[in-house]
Amino acid sequence: MNSDLIEERKKVAFNIEEFTNWYYGGAEKVTEQKFFENYFLNDPELRDNIATSYLSHQELYEESIRKATVVLKKLKHLRNQGYNDKDLYSKILGGTFQKYIFREGNPLSVHFDMFIPAIKNMATLEQQAEWLPKAEICNMIGAYAQTELGHGTFVRGLETTAIFDQRCQQFVINSPTITAYKWWPGGLGHTANYALVFAQLYTQQKNHGVHAFLVQLRDEETHKPLKGITIGEIGTKVGFNSVNNGYLGFKNVRIPLKNMLMKNAKVLPNGQYKKSQSALLNYGTMTYIRVGIVIEAASFMANAATIAMRYSLVRRQSPIEPDQPEPKIIEHVTQQMKIFPVIAKTIIFKQAAEFLWGMFNDVSKELEKGDLSRLPELHALSCCLKAICSNEATQAIEVCRLACGGHGYLTSSGFNNMYKMVTSAQTYEGENTVLLLQTARFLIKSWGQALKGEKLTPTVEYLKHFVSRSGETVAWDGSPNGIIRAFQSATAGKVALAYKHIEERKKFLSPEEAVNQTGIELTKAAELHCQLFLLQSASTSINQAIKKLSPALAFVLRDILELYAVDLAIKSLESLLQFVTATSEDIDRLQVRLEAALKRFRTNAIGIVDGFEISDLVLGSTLGAYDGNVYERLLNEAKKSPLNQEDVNKSFYLYLKPFMKSNL
Amino acid sequence: MNSDLIEERKKVAFNIEEFTNWYYGGAEKVTEQKFFENYFLNDPELRDNIATSYLSHQELYEESIRKATVVLKKLKHLRNQGYNDKDLYSKILGGTFQKYIFREGNPLSVHFDMFIPAIKNMATLEQQAEWLPKAEICNMIGAYAQTELGHGTFVRGLETTAIFDQRCQQFVINSPTITAYKWWPGGLGHTANYALVFAQLYTQQKNHGVHAFLVQLRDEETHKPLKGITIGEIGTKVGFNSVNNGYLGFKNVRIPLKNMLMKNAKVLPNGQYKKSQSALLNYGTMTYIRVGIVIEAASFMANAATIAMRYSLVRRQSPIEPDQPEPKIIEHVTQQMKIFPVIAKTIIFKQAAEFLWGMFNDVSKELEKGDLSRLPELHALSCCLKAICSNEATQAIEVCRLACGGHGYLTSSGFNNMYKMVTSAQTYEGENTVLLLQTARFLIKSWGQALKGEKLTPTVEYLKHFVSRSGETVAWDGSPNGIIRAFQSATAGKVALAYKHIEERKKFLSPEEAVNQTGIELTKAAELHCQLFLLQSASTSINQAIKKLSPALAFVLRDILELYAVDLAIKSLESLLQFVTATSEDIDRLQVRLEAALKRFRTNAIGIVDGFEISDLVLGSTLGAYDGNVYERLLNEAKKSPLNQEDVNKSFYLYLKPFMKSNL
């Protein structure tokens, strides 16, 4: 154990376990998580003896298929042992956890995560009875083939066609253009033998929009692609290189009528099309996945902060006092400014996600009763939270990496693996700008309702207070509630401005083009609304929690909230100062508070990251392990490089020596 | 050729060639660049038949050694053919150019880029005569072994020792601890057979600080590591994975007295130490490299903007008007807001770098005459520019990648290769925060001089105007000069505040700790000063250039300047509004100007990126090629994946099929 870390841990002024149990919502959850970590990550068959970054793309895929089958066997074993958790598969294969087993992704996760749930959602009971048993034992491995080479966000624009041939009682599937090729589905390249294919349905010479069809892609015995199927993987990416994202083209591929998923719509044998149920409930799934992204963002940020924090207590660099030894780099205030706000943000994001999670469960219950009234609000919140949290988590990981200097650039630091995953969440499940515009649409609509004196849903109710004061600025008040009011004022101000500009533009443009032209302000308004929600929901839940926690921990959590609020206020001054009147001294005071909050948090910071309780196996970092033996780990990890297994690499004999000699 | 692109190019309202020649400083330079591109990148021996991302780490290294010898042979051939450019090697091996040949770096570049120049700078003429001929024909391949596992920024803290043994007339080199291991030097792992080793010199029981020594590492014939040498590579990184960064430990390695580089200091045979010359001139080299990083940042941004811009004219997504077909994604104003500012920034960075380049040449001439007066100013500028430009270029590349949606995440888009390189420049050659604090130190010193009424150097002269008005805010004025004045006011205001806070803290703390505690404000002041310099120097040079250019091009360049200035002002409101009084309407007007500038630039944007004249070979992007055949290229590139060379991957037989069968 590094002696600096031992010394630092002695200074922590609160009970770390109390924090851990509060943060994860109870000791049982922490125990369960530890059980899973140990059961999976400690299995020699699942540990990387050599980092995946040394493998070729093909080796990486093969290795991940091997591991995927090991994980599935272990899951089955748990079940057989009576481990009785109906969410077991999705717990392990769905969330963040599997990303520690598969640092470049699991080619089988889409099968469990999307293919099987989609069949449950979209197939009739008869279809489910036929397909699910095969799917659950992986005799049928499915991909979710929606996105096309030329079509992503706008699902209605998909080009793949499924034309009903009444004579044969079959659908004929085709990719009429190159842009109609399916592109991106995980596991599609070489893993899946079936796919849910989303295609434009045609019957009786009429287009009925996009529907889902179960299409067999490969022979169940030989795994060879079937006739009419052009299939492969789409090549290397920033990350997720073992997910086996694929492409897929169809040429007159015929499937039986019964392979259309018919829960929500039907084609009858005579070709007649019948819509039975709206697909509104899909909003629920989308929201569920987006809440998951927010939680995952917090989880990756916790990892990044843990690594950077521990390293900053071990690494010594650049004397502050000329005659003193090099200090721990955390003593440089600029270093604190990089890491402490990330720690604070992690906790705030987690709290906000829990809040959203509660709301999601409430709304789901209301939906079951047919009450859709709060769905738009939930949708609007989940959109902006997914966008902002995935974006800020990516930035936070980068800041932590840079805070570790050159060593942060090493794969063995662990940052790059996280970055590759988190940054992809900025694009998938709704591209971030598209999502912010969705939230903005809700805000504009709410503003219109506020203008008319109508009732607003809870998270936008604050807008009402600004309707009569539009254009006026409010005076700055630096109290916690004052900062929240400042954000409310700024968000309302931005929404009002955008609303006004849309109305003005409507005089010359269509409503849609008017909205488009106002897009920059709209995204800004959505960002502010999201920041407000994060601050407000986390404040509420932390202030409530504090009542039940020990004074020492309450003190630290209050500091964290202060640090988060002040840092956010300073970074948002650009927007706040347009709608809030503050003096130069007010701003100077914020800076003083920020510096004071960093100073107070200094000795407790290691306690918080230790309290995140991230095991060394999950972290997978030479710089962040609990014992702080950074330099030994760096060297040991380097020695595992395949290139280091030989004194002289063959390129010396092949190229270098002949070249050196030729010049003599 | 994509028909949308043909149509768009017809709308460009200025002469692209005129822009290109202005941008690169003359038609000859453009022609020369094209000659090199063709000579190197079109050589089948240097083209990647398969993307490097598919290779294993070891294959990647071997392939890069092969390519490096091909490049060197071609360079020699050029020389032999009478190509008479004394900077030929550094042109090809030093700058951005080689990064298009070696997307993961060239293990031999440090030899030419740092090892040989260092010998020229630090070795005596006799030493040069002995070593350079061997180095120039690569019989001696050298690494530059400075950084250690535990020591980077603070060079005086290096631990490797070189103890003079007078009896044998040798130095004994040791790594006394694990943190003393050399770590990071490019080419050190398996390529170099020699290294310049920086070590603490001891003679006559006295430490004389860090000096450089030439140490043989490997046998010249067998390439085996010599006795006492522990050597290898440090493992995979975010990027530069074929640079072969290495580690190196010494155990009683003996080298002759004459292997100490003795131009600036000597050890006599009797062990006496003599310092002969100050190492101040090293500032020159560091500045030179930092100007290079700024130019490279602009060059990568030009690439990123070219890819995102062309793709945005080809890709169609999400109808704006509900009854219309999907528009080119550039029609979404939020998309323009992502890409156009990057195009503008590219041009501004390039101009500022040229300005700095001119200053560097002037100061170099003054240095030769012994006049050091402008060195601190040049150093301060190069520090903050390197930090800000490397940081903003990294962000710009990410913004452009995200603007290309999912496809931007593919390696074949080209973004990830750029990101990996540019982000590393945030850490190497001076970690960015350390550099900003260097600039801040200069600003604080200048402010002190201003308070005393002393003369200031040109780039900080503006501070004088704010000495008497400290604390007051100036009124907002949105004119080009008004924006510059606002930045001057804000920078001076931040410098004054930081100065005041340091003075206050000095009452309780040492001067050094007072500076440390003020670090956050100091970095902010340095950032603002840098933004001011970028805006002001680029404005000056563009406004001058415009006089000699055609009205059509002048119009576009004025737009670019307006776009840059307004965008920068909005993003900097957080700082500006603390020192400048603006109304809510003033800020609203900035937003209107921003939107108007985007709109005016819309049809000319493709002309500017075409005018960057980046060949498809250099771009290496499926999304950004000149012809816009995005989808064909994506599919063709994917088909080259090694996994796609077989219908069924062996992992099916090895793991998947047995697993599927076991469940039946």
Image: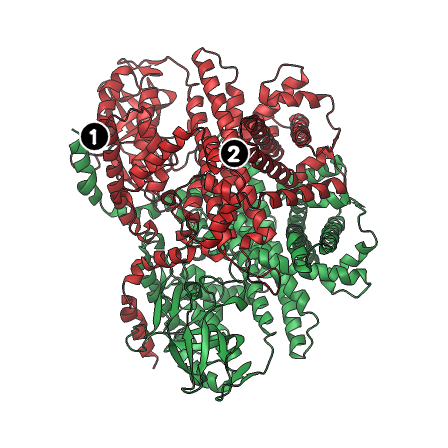
Chain colours: A red, B green
- Do residues under tags 2 and 1 come within 8 Å of each other at their CB atoms? no
Kindly identify which residue carries mark 2.
A349
Mark 2 or mark 1: whose residue is earlier in sequence: 1
Q: Looking at this rendering, what residue extends furthest in the top direction?
A: A369
In the image: residue B503, left or right of residue B267: right
> Where residue A326 sits: x, y (%)?
55, 61
Q: Nearer the viewer, residue A15 or B431?
A: A15
In this rendering, the answer to whether B31 lies above or below A332 is below
At 43% across and 68% down in the image, what residue appears? B109
* Tag 2 subunit: A
At 34% across and 51% down in the image, what residue appears? A53
Could you tell me the amino acid type at mark 2? Answer: Phe
> Where residue B459 sits: x, y (%)?
72, 61
Q: How many marks?
A: 2
* Tag 1 subunit: A
Q: Are marks 2 and 1 on the same chain?
A: yes
Label 1: element kind: loop
In this rendering, the answer to whether B537 lies above or below B4 is below
Decide: few, some or many residues near mark 2? Use Cα within 10 Å; few <14, some 14-19, many ≥20.
Answer: many
Q: Nearer the viewer, residue A46 or A103?
A: A46
In the image: residue A644, left or right of residue B176: left
- Does the rendering let one see residue A359? yes
In this rendering, the answer to whether A538 lies above or below A231 is above
- Does the rendering let one see residue A145? no
At 48% across and 12% down in the image, what residue appears? A371
Label drawn at residue A139: 1
Mark nearer the viewer, 2 or 1: 2
Q: Looking at this rendering, what residue extends furthest in the bottom direction?
A: B270
In the image: residue A137, left or right of residue A555: left
